[in-house]
Amino acid sequence: MNTVAIIDYGMGNLHSARKAVEHVAPDCTVLVTDDATKIREADRVILPGVGAIRDCMAEMHRLGVVELVKEVSQDRPFLGICVGMQALMASSYYNRAEEEAIKQNFEEKAEELCLVKTDVPQAWPAWSQLAYRTETSLKAVMAQELGLNADNLPDTLRLMVCGAQSGQRAMELAQYLDDVEIIAVDESLANVAKGTRMAQELNMDNIVFWPWSIAQRFVLDGHRVHWVEVGRLPSPAMTDLSLAKLVNSASVAGAVVHMHTAMAEQTAGDKQIRQLIKEHKLQPTRTSLRQLRRMILAERQDSVWAELLQEDDFYSLGGCRDRWFRPQDADQLQNLLAMVSNEVDWKLVKARDEDGHSLATAPVQRQIQAEALGSEVQSLMGQNLSVYFQRRR
C-alpha cells in the first residue's frame, strides 16, 4: 500500500492538502507528520506552504527539516505546493520589492535601469542562514591567533570586508565578534541590497552594506579601519578603483589585512568561456548565460569542462554571470601583494596553507617581495595561501 507523507512544519493548509490526497487516492495511507523516520519511509512526500518564503524557510531551519527535504525530494515522487515549491529552489525573488527599495539609495541603480528586467543581476551566492560560532572579540582574535598586542585598541573596532558578495561571511563576523562595526563592500548592487535586507531582518545594527563608490568616499573623508578582510576581488569593470590604494589609505597603524594569494573561478572552462564572450562580444543577458551553460552541458564529456562542472556557481545564472562577465581582476591582487611587500610599512604576521597549517613567515615574505619585483619563479599567484599583514605605521 502506498504511503503519502505531508510534512508538518507549521506552514501550509495541512487539512486541505490531506483531504485532497485522500479524495484523489483513496487507497493510499496519508500521514500528516513531522517525524523524520515516517517521512523517509513514505513512498511519496508533499511539502505544503502558505505565506512568505522567508517565514517558510525560517520554520524549516528552526525545525531542522531542510536537509530532510533535500534528501527525500531526490529519490521519490515529491510535490511542493505554493511556497513549499519555492523552498526547493536555490533562491527566491519573493523579497525583490524590498531589495529594490534599498537599491534606490545608490547611484549604481541607474545602470540597472538600462537593462531588460530579466537581465537585472541577482544576489549571489544564495544563502538563508548563518553558521554558528562561539562569540568572541576581534581583539581576542588579534591577540590569541596573531600574537598582536591589542591592549591599546579602542572598545569598538571597525572591520571592512572587501568583496563581501551577498553578505554571509560579513554577517557571520558581525554576529560572533562582539567588539566590531562592519562595513561590507561589494561590486554587485544586488548583493548590497540582499545583505542590507538580511541584516535588517536579523536585527543586526553593527553592519552596513555599501557599493565601492560609498566606501571610497568614506575613506576620502578620513575614516579609518582596524581590520580589512579581502574577499572576492573587483572585476576589470571597476576601472576607477584601486583596491591596494583604498586598503592602504583606510588602514590605521596596527591594522591587519587578511587576504588569499590565489583567485577562484580560474578553471580551464572559465577561461574558454571568457574567450568566447570576448570573441563574440556577448552581453550578460539571461539568454546568453543559458546558451553558454547548455553548450557546456552538451559537451560535458570534454575534459576542459570537468572542473567547472564541479563548481556550485555553474548551476546558478547569478554565479555564471559573476564568473564569466565580472571575473576577478588579477591586477588588483598583484597590486595588493606589491603594497604589502614593502616591509617598511607592512609586516607579515601569519601565513597558512590551504589546509590551514601555519607556515614560516620569512620564506613567504621573500616570495611576496619577489612577486613585487616581477619574478614568476617564486610567484605566489596560484598558491592558495591565507596571509595576515599588520601595518607598521
Image: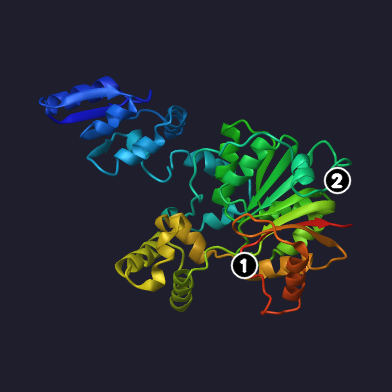
Q: Quadrant of residue 77?
A: top left
Q: At label 2, which amino acid type do we have? A: Asn
Q: Please say if 80 is above or below 114.
A: above
The quarter of the image holding the C terminus is bottom right
Badge number at residue 249: none
Gap in angstroms between the C-alphas marked 1 and 2: 29 Å
**Residue 289 left/right relative to 125:** left
Q: Mark 1 points at which residue?
A: 383
From the top left corner, tell me how far across and down residue 102 is, in percent: 58, 42
Outermost residue toward the top in this view:
15
Question: Which residue is at 73% across, 66% downward?
Answer: 364
Instruction: Check disc 2 and report the residue beneath it.
Output: 149
Q: Residue at x 37, y 64 (%)?
A: 293
At 29% from the left edge and 44% from the top edge, which residue is drawn? 74
Q: Could you say which quadrant of the image residue 149 lies in?
A: top right
Q: Is residue 132 left or right of residue 274?
A: right
The residue lying toward the viewer, choosing from 339 and 359, is 359
The image position of residue 368, as x and y in percent, is: 74, 70
